[in-house]
DNA sequence: TCTGCTCTTGACAGCGCTGTCAGCCGACGA
DNA sequence: TCGTCGGCTGACAGCGCTGTCAAGAGCAGA
């Protein structure tokens, strides 16, 4: 086990009291320069390292850690979020503690518990389940919570989301404007808020455009690329197959592309994906893009702001989306 | 601020001593069932949550946190590592604290410091710099360190790497066997060990195959896709342009593909990439693949093992690689 | 009934640090 | 010369929990 000198040892070596040593190492004022130097020398030569655990405890039991509970860190969207959060927290001298829920509500609440035991100063969550009663209790107890990507139903907390409706509308219009009428929609799990928003807007736009019963091309369950692939394949094999597909998340886009590769005439089907991804550019895929890193950054910013000022009004940040035309969305109907 | 009941409050409510309450909440034996129940009820009704910070301190000042310092969490390779690590740690009741160094040695050492202040029980690192003197001191002080992806030069620590030589050899042979002689190599920063291993083996195999001066097609600096793209474009524009490219990491592969798209005749150039990536399958890119999640898992496993038994012999784990033929690497020379 | 044991419980002293408060000293103004 | 004030320092009491140790209760066997 790692035995390190404590502050007391440093203080003794420098011939000062514990408290004075503490002052020096925390950069507090009102220490004579000579004393300061003696303590610093002692600390350096002993290889002293302050114990943040003890310091946090003494200061009131709160750590300078912020927890982030997310669906799946291996998904490029979530890792972009995490990187935005981390960057912002760092500016404020805070550290990020990540945990992934695998989109499982039960695991989410277990993780919440663990992070709370660690006395995180705030929690940033992409809510998996619909039931946030556990969280609600914590908020009442004074915990700072920020939700990101999806709002937490019925909870009055700071939230950062993108303009899902606007993005879905733009994407659908984009395809309609290129002449498509039969447009498929490959979406995520129906209980996810993002699915609901995107699909509802898709249907609304189709109705406005006078396309009857667009619901027949609506599919859901594409939370993995493999599932999306099957859904897309089934959709494209139908008698009334769409000439264009709106893939409602990055997994769905990949799966749809896989399906299109295997279906005869698949190369002619227009595709617009929701969520940009690195190779979309190379593949020439038109997407609804937004800034996931910024999303994380804003969430962290809100967390910091609320910790500092618990009574500030709850904020809802909605980030804009843009359609990036790269070819796949501009193909005319076959 | 989040005011929560302390153990003392719970104990009082249950009419027992602090210590007995502690026993119950830690699941220790030798507590009368009736007492146990009283304490549990009190804890539940008060919304008690143990303070892991204080508990860790009382237990000796070590947290059940394991730190992971990595290059860039947004890179799919590192996030796969992180997810493997997290999964394994969880099995042992440990939590992961991630921090990214942006491949910057200075930042790496600052982060190391922060994690140590947090008294992480172990540190898993993908070493950025060449100078690990700071780490060396910590190890001497008893810290458990495991390095992953690249060995830390001159340090006797547990290490998990892939068989870079074997992978590079297989990839180069693969291209040679498909008739290529002029083979380009687009590699990472030259100070990285993985670059050195892969490039050295590439040159060795080329020499064995009787291809003179393969070094003329060797390029480095492809740590981002953009940089790789420029390198590959330059390589392919030369008078003695290669008919095949070995892209030595996932960034390099993406950049190379971008360059090939833009260069006339680029579609005929064979490509083998080092590191698999999600869309490689869709794009038909032949790659040298290995299991990054497993790599993380093994690293975490070693960290746990060494923490438990500090004197065990140092281990070097080398994971195998495979060539996955998907088309791009099987194209004959033009 | 007494001894010896196990089971259960609690008192107490920290873990390593910080906040509070009080004390000391030299300097400065009157 | 004295009073006062500001800079500097240290004693001390915790933060919320756990480890140690010892004491009390209950019970079996002698």
Image (cartoon, coloured by chain):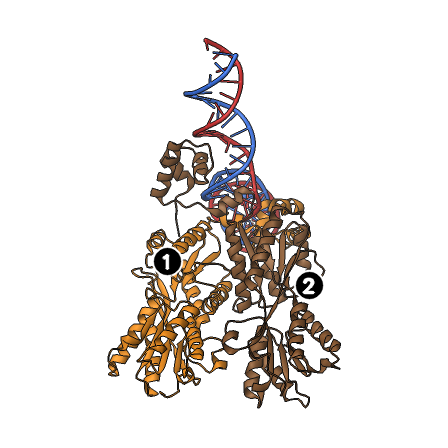
Chain colours: A brown, B orange, C blue, D red
Q: Position of residue D12 (x, y in %)?
A: 51, 31
| A200 lies above or below B31 | below
Q: Could one spot residue B163 in this view of the protein? A: no
Q: On the picture, is B110 further left or further right than B9?
A: left
Q: Toward the viewer: B182 or A125? A: B182
Q: Chain of mark 1?
A: B
Query: Which residue sits at x=66%, y=68%?
Result: A164
Figure check: B167 above or below B24: below
Residue at point 65% right, 65% down? A163
* Disc 1 element: loop
Q: Where does the C terminus of chain B fall, quadrant-wise?
A: bottom left
Q: How busy is the neighbourhood of tag 2: few (under 14 within 10 Å), some, or many (20 plus)?
A: some
Nearest to the observer: residue A189 or residue B26: A189
Residue A47 position in % (x across, y down): 36, 45
Residue at 43 percent across and 58 percent down: it is B101
Q: Would you say the residues marked 1 and 2 are in contact, meaning their CB atoms lie under 8 Å apart? A: no
Chain of the residue on which disc 2 is drawn: A
User: Residues at marks 1 and 2, common chain?
Assistant: no
Q: Is residue A233 visible?
A: yes
Q: Position of residue A183 (x, y in %)?
A: 67, 81
* Vertical side of A279 occupied by B104: above or below: above
Nearer to us in this view, B247 or B99 = B247
Which residue is at a point 44% across and 45% down the rendered structure image? A50
Left or right for A192, reference B322: right
- Badge 1: residue crowd in 10 Å (few <14, some 14–19, many ≥20): some
Q: CA distance from mark 1 to mark 2?
A: 44 Å
Asked where in the image residue B243 lies, by quadrant, the reply is bottom left
| Badge 2 element | loop
Left or right of B1 on screen, residue B202: left
Residue B188: image x %, image y %? 37, 68
Q: Which residue is mark 2?
A: A131
Q: Which residue is mark 1?
A: B310
């Amino acid at each position: 086990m790692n035995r390190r000198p404590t502050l007391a040892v440093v203080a003794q070596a420098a011939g000062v009291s514990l408290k004075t040593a503490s002052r020096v190492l925390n950069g507090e004022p009102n220490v004579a320069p000579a004393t300061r130097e003696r303590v610093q020398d002692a600390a350096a030569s002993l290889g002293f390292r302050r114990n943040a655990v003890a310091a946090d405890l003494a200061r009131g039991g709160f750590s300078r850690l912020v927890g982030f509970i997310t669906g799946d860190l291996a998904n490029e969207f979530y890792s972009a979020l995490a990187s935005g959060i981390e960057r912002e927290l760092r500016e404020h001298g805070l550290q990020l503690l990540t945990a992934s829920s695998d989109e499982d509500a039960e695991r989410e609440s277990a993780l919440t518990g663990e992070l709370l035991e660690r006395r995180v100063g705030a929690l940033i969550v992409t809510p998996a389940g619909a039931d946030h009663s556990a969280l609600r209790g914590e908020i009442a107890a004074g915990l700072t919570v920020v939700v990101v990507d999806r709002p937490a139903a019925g909870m009055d907390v700071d939230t950062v989301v993108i303009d899902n409706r606007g993005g879905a509308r733009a994407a659908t219009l984009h395809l309609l404007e290129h002449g498509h009428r039969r447009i498929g929609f490959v979406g995520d799990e129906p209980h996810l808020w993002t699915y609901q928003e995107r699909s509802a807007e898709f249907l609304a736009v189709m109705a406005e455009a006078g396309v009857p019963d667009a619901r027949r091309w609506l599919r859901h369950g594409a939370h993995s690329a493999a599932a999306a692939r099957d859904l897309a394949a089934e959709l494209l094999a139908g008698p009334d197959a769409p000439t264009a597909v709106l893939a409602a998340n990055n997994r769905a886009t990949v799966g749809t592309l896989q399906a299109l590769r295997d279906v005869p005439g698949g190369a002619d089907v227009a595709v617009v994906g929701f969520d940009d991804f690195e190779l979309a550019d190379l593949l020439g895929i038109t997407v609804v893009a937004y800034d996931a890193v910024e999303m994380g950054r804003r969430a962290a910013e809100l967390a910091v702001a609320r910790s500092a000022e618990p009574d500030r009004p709850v904020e809802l940040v909605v980030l804009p989306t843009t359609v990036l035309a790269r070819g796949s969305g501009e193909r005319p109907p076959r």
